[in-house]
Amino acid sequence: MMKRKILCLISALLLCASAGAQELNAKVIINRSQVSNTKSGVFDALEKSVTQYLNERAWTNLRFREMERIQCTFNITVDTYSETDNSFRGSLLVACIRPVYNSSYTSTVWNMNDKDFDFTFQEFDQLEWRPEQVDNNLTAMLAYWAYMIIGLDLDSMSPMGGTEVLHMAQDICNNAEGLGYKGWKAFDNNKNRFAIVNDYLDGGMEKFRQMQYVYYRKGLDQMAENTTTGREAITEAMNLLKESHEDKSLSQLPQIFTDFKRDEIVSIFSGQGSATEREAIYDILFRINPSQNTYWEKLKQ
């Protein structure tokens, strides 16, 4: 009887531990090569604090097993640092990947440089997130990107599955605008944090979000079992990408997507399918992102 009670207690503890388990497995890198004559202590503390902040918190009520945690990187480049007021000016390269079913391949779900990553931090600061009181730009920016990463990952798993989490990121934008830092304001920049999440949740970009699910779940995830079926789904996704670009031509999301997907898309279609199919994919990609035409030309070979 005692043994059974102990087993029940252990099971209950495991269930509690799994509820709302941490969603992220983030690697944090602080690049301070442009900052000289400064002791490393504050930068080491920053890297440790940001890593703990991102990885030791349950950002949602969803249950993620350890193997399901989202692999992501936060590469912070510090351009200037002032010991006088503990201010940092720099940028953040944020990226996340997801595994492709039945393969060892991982696919990039997001990769972008947030150029307005400015904040204050002291060596012994404790980073805490209080959504009801957004008063720290560093914790707000990190929380924003945490919610964006989770929302984007969920969109790749089910049709528009990340809506609720993406709204959390949008709420941060609305609450952080008064902090006085760049990146939060509407219409300031068509690639800032406000613009990104606002476009994702705009009805005019619904087809873009549908495209995410078709591309990953119906496309990439099926390719190990049936390459042709998977490629056909990705062709469908490219047509949704085209329609989303036509529905809201000023949105930067289709261009950002094709920037970090260029190698993967070219690899999927190069030498595969008919010449007519590849020409159609080329036309879509060139209209959305002509700056990457060196890559798109490979589709014609």
Image (spheres, rainbow, N blue to C red):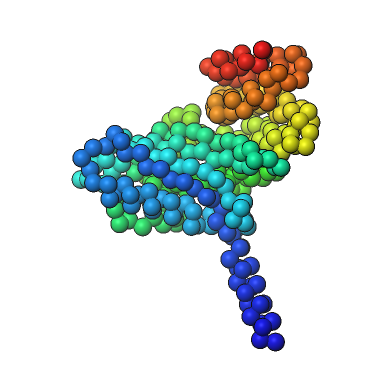
Please provide percent x and percent y for residue 74.
45, 42
Residue 177 in view: no
> Could you tell me residue 160's position as x and y percent?
67, 41
Q: Residue furthest front?
A: 104
Q: Residue at x 57, y 59 (%)?
A: 21
Q: Vertical placement of 133 versus 289: above or below?
A: below
Count of marks overlaid on the render: 0
Q: Within the image, what quadrant is residue 119 found in?
A: top left
Left or right of 34? Residue 237 is right
Q: Residue at image x 38%, y 46%?
A: 137
Q: Quadrant of residue 9?
A: bottom right
Query: In percent of the image, x 27 and y 47: which residue is there?
Result: 40
Q: Nearer the viewer, residue 169 or 128?
A: 128
- Above or below — where is 135 with respect to 111? below
Location of the N terminus by quadrant is: bottom right
Residue 28 position, x and y percent, is: 43, 45
Q: Position of residue 286 (x, y in %)?
A: 61, 16
Q: Is residue 24 left or right of residue 157?
A: left
- Front one among 287 and 226: 226
- What residue do we see at 28% from left, 43% from top? 87
Residue 295 seen from this side? yes
User: Which quadrant of the rendered structure holds the C terminus?
Assistant: top right
Position of residue 63 in the picture relative to residue 194 (left or right): right
Where is residue 148, by image quadrant?
top right
